[in-house]
Amino acid sequence: MEEIIGLATKARKTGLVSLESDAEQTQAPFLRKTLTLAVDGCDIQELRKVMELEIDLTESRGLAEAHVFEAAGGYAPTIGIIGAVLGLIQVMKRLSDTEQVGHGIATAFVATVYGVAIANLFFLPAANKIKARLAEETQRKELILEGVCAIVEGLNPKLVRSKLEAYVPDKTEPGARGRSGQRKAA
């Protein structure tokens, strides 16, 4: 956000074309691409359309990845139950040996425990983490797009800041602070 405010201030003083070198030097690929299109004189509606398409496609790819893990989380307990059933079938073959029946039943149900554990300790949390990171990345890209569009519109940097602060979590909201206790910023 601070980088965009700095770019807005520079564009306000020296013009939009002066941001060309800044666009080439920026580390964020999405910001670089958005700024390059803006500096090249791309119409603001077309700029917004192109970059929103990129955001949507990135989001679709990320959700597809998350769905793979969600599906695996749904199938893992079923596979565990299949393992338990197969184990019980083996136990039924040896019903004449009563000492082995209890041990065989216990072993058969271990497969169910593994299936449920893998689903709930790995696959489903991984899917949720992918979705959370994707949402954060989408919000960051939307902030960049709004900031660059505001620069193209020639808005006052203070107004740009006000507009972009809507994307940054409020200090009083739960979860608004990062690991270091700092307020999150793009």
Image (tube, helix red, strand yellow):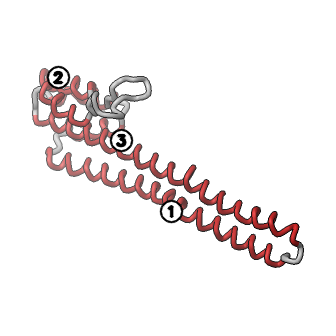
Q: Quadrant of the N terminus?
A: top left
Q: Report how far apart the C-alphas of labels 1 and 3 lie in the structure.
A: 23 Å
Q: Say whether residue 55 is left or right of residue 150.
A: right
Residue 61 seen in the current view: yes
Find residue 24 and report its image quarter.
top left
Instruction: State whether residue 169 is above or below residue 74.
Output: above
- Amino acid type, callout 1: Ala
Mark 1 or 3, nearer chain start:
1
Q: Which labelled disc corresponds to residue 181?
A: none
Bin the neighbour count of mark 3 within 10 Å (Cα to Cα): few under 14, some 14-19, many 20 and up: few
Which quadrant does the C terminus fall into? top left
Q: Amino acid at mark 2?
A: Thr
- Up the image or down, 110 lies above or below 55; here it is below
Locate residue 38 relative to residue 25 in the image: left or right. Answer: left
Which of 93 and 57 lies nearest the eye of the viewer?
93
- Residue nearest the observer in this picture, 108 or 49: 108
- The Cα–Cα distance between marks 3 and 2, rounded to whole angstroms, is 26 Å
Residue behind mark 3 = 136
Q: Contact (CB < 8 A) between labels 1 and 3?
A: no
**Which residue is disc 1 drawn over?**
71
Residue holding disc 2: 9
Where residue 136 appears, x then y in whole percent? 35, 41
Of the residues tagged 1 and 3, which is closer to the observer?
1
Cα gap from disc 1 to disc 2, whole angstroms? 48 Å
- Residue type (three-letter) at the residue carrying disc 3: Glu
**Which element is circle 3 on?**
helix
Which residue corresponds to the image point at 46% horizontal and 55% vertical from the top-left?
65
Q: Is residue 36 visible?
A: no
Residue 67 in the image: x percent, y percent? 45, 59
